[in-house]
Amino acid sequence: MISLRLLAPLLSLVALAVGTALLARRDGRIRPATVAWLAVPVLTLVWLTVWLALDLYHEGRKEIVLVCAAALVAGACALGRDRVRSALGAKGPRTRAAVFVGSLLACTVLTFLALELPSAIAADTILPQFALLECALILGTALALYYLLQRRGAGVAILSTALALIGIAEFFVMSFKGAAILPTDLLVLGTAAAVSGGYVYTVAAKVLLAISCWLFCVAVSSLMVAFPAVRADARRRAVLGNLGAGLACALAVTLGVVLPSYEGLGVEISYWNTVWTYHTHGFLPSFIAITQDLAIEVPEGYSDESAAELEASYVAAYDETRGASESRVAAEEQFSELQPSVVYVVNETFADLNSLGDEPWGYAGPERYNSRDDTLLRGALSVSITGGGTANSEFEVLTGVSLAYVGEGKYPFSLYDLSLGPSVVRQFKDLGYETTAMHPNIPNNYNRLTAYEGLGFDTYLSIEDFEGAEWFHSGVSDAATYEKVLEVLESSDQPQFIFDLTMQNHSSYDQNNLGDVPQYSIDGLDEDENAQLSEYIACIEESDRALEEFLGELEELDRPVVVVFLGDHESRVAPFVNDALHPGETGYAHETRLYETIYTVWANYDVAGAEQNSPVRDTGISYVTALALDVIGAPLTDLQKAQVVASEELPAVTAMGVRDLEGTWVPLDEASTVSSAYDDLQTITYLEFGRHVS
């Protein structure tokens, strides 16, 4: 039996079919243009029918009825457009101009709604001045396309369709990642497509409202009259005139995008809450403002000479203190003799959710990890991302370059030539190490093929190299990647640098593919959120078990190995856990809890000069490599020496902010008040990275 929800789109399709048949009987033949315009509401109704049949819409019926009504209006306009356009063409120029202006303004407003409604949280969140700015950009672009297509409404419809699709994409990105679409996301569309299969594409009522607005816009666009000139010479002049008008409008829009500073116009970019930026300032103004912010900022008063002198002062400070200590000298001598292999494990969403709250709620955290008492270093790890964007954590840990000095919201793997900047991979390669990266997924996600080559990896093992490997939750299991690490270690007597980026804990956490798992519950979470929480914790439990087993196997291995292990970012579970543990709390302090994971440095041999009793040192992800290489006695670059020194005053520098010696987060615009080391590191980082890639 057909459900009541399905009746509306099915009856609407029948109505359009009947209307098409009647038109064909009357006119004998339907023009291709009519078919093209009619295809829009028909395909929309087919999509709606499929989505309802798949139970991917769970809200009210009135939105379904509205989409069907809009589709019928668009269909009626498509079927009757020739008569309407003929009637309009017979009117006087003033009437035609008034109808055109009214139609264009209506399409502008409808397109604005189609873009903004899917991700809107309320009707009035966008400030009026930015709503007008966005409408002006839409209007100018619509005029440009209208004239470039020789005064045809198809140009307006194409623009509306493109922006409506962007609005729907924004809805899904906000639903899945809790973030807005950023300009650099366009450079990683392949990655987004590769992981898109793990999500459930349920639409909300506001998405159907947006689709209705778009259909009404298409309906109005279909009736816009071209008014072609009759004589051949007049037609040529009209074509050239339309092209000129279209290009003039396009130039005006381009200048309106490029020339003014959108931050100067009042667009406030909140990189720690881009959703707020988009909700307050609109999609287009926010997107343009962030695009204008992509360039790496040159530090005030920067010169290569002064930067080199500053870096040299930090190097001297290291050499005279930590570098001259007995423990460091002993570790250096041992490292030179042993040349231990070094394994980096960047573990997907590995974190301890207990960091989000002070009160116990029944979860002990990753117990095996927490109970180890033989590590060289361990502690909380401040990161620049949350919920996704793993490549940025990879970038920071492999280069030592903090995104605070590059700009949050950028994906350096996709933007820059990484062969021009610092790389721990090349450091070890220059020491005679074989270098291997592995990630059991599509090889070029986040442009990794190019990025890894630029960083200096000799070999890159991707999903093709894990055929038949054990699968857990969202991908190849952690345990299977550790088996591959052991294979690489055993494949050569040469010292190895291995980078293992795991996959199993990737979202989403409503897959229900782990069987019976321990159930956790937090007051304030609904049944679905508690289920996601339990599934995520089950993933971390398996990661914890696999890591313990891996370290046990390394203990039995007859060669020295160092492991640097860290979580790349918090999961999509963390935000609602944070909200539940701190009900009613908002603001910077609330948000920053989502930017902390954990890390450890471990060795299967006694490192000279180190106590190896799991000393706690909270740090930031861009410091991890410098601190790890320092404690094991590996050679340090000038940048790394500067970081070791700076970390004594400034324990973490991330795109989210910095942390002071008490562990308090401080926004970047106040970072200089914590320590002068923040500005110094910005200058040194630009010397080592920014000036080479900008």
Image (cartoon, rainbow, N blue to C red):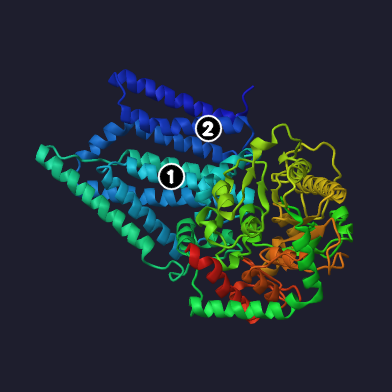
Q: Is residue 592 above or below residue 524?
A: below
Left or right: 125 as drawn, with respect to 356:
left
Q: How far across and down, in percent of the image, does residue 558 sit?
A: 84, 49
Q: Position of residue 354 (x, y in %)?
A: 81, 60
Q: Dot 2 surroundings within 10 Å: few (below 14), some, or many (20 or more)?
A: few
Residue that numbered label 2 is attached to: 47
Foreground of the two, 53 or 597: 597
In the rendered structure, the answer to whether residue 147 lies left or right of residue 635 reads left
Between 636 and 136, the residue placed more toward the observer is 636
The residue lying at 62 percent from left, 76 percent from top is: 678
Q: Amino acid at mark 1?
A: Ala
Q: Residue 460 versus residue 339: which sits nearer the camera?
A: 339
CB-based contact (under 8 Å), mark 2 and mark 1 = no
Question: Label 2 is placed on what type of residue?
Answer: Trp
Q: Tell me where residue 452 appears, x and y as whole percent.
A: 59, 50
SS for dot 1? helix
Disc 2 is placed on an element classified as helix
Q: Residue furthest front?
A: 337
Q: Pointer 1: what residue?
A: 162
Q: Where is residue 528 shown, x and y percent of the image?
A: 75, 45
Please name whichever residue, 578 or 444, is drawn nearer the observer in this view of the structure.
444
Depth check, mark 2 against mark 1: the one in front is 1
Q: Is residue 34 left or right of residue 395?
A: left
Q: Residues within 10 Å of mark 1 (few under 14, many from 20)?
A: few
**Vertical comparison of 384 with 53: above or below:** below
Q: CA distance from mark 2 to mark 1?
A: 17 Å
Tell me what residue is drawn at x 60 percent, y 33 percent: 52
How many badges with numbers are in the image? 2
Which numbered marker is on residue 465? Answer: none
The reply to whether residue 520 is visible in this rendering is: no
Residue sitting at x 64%, y 53%: 390
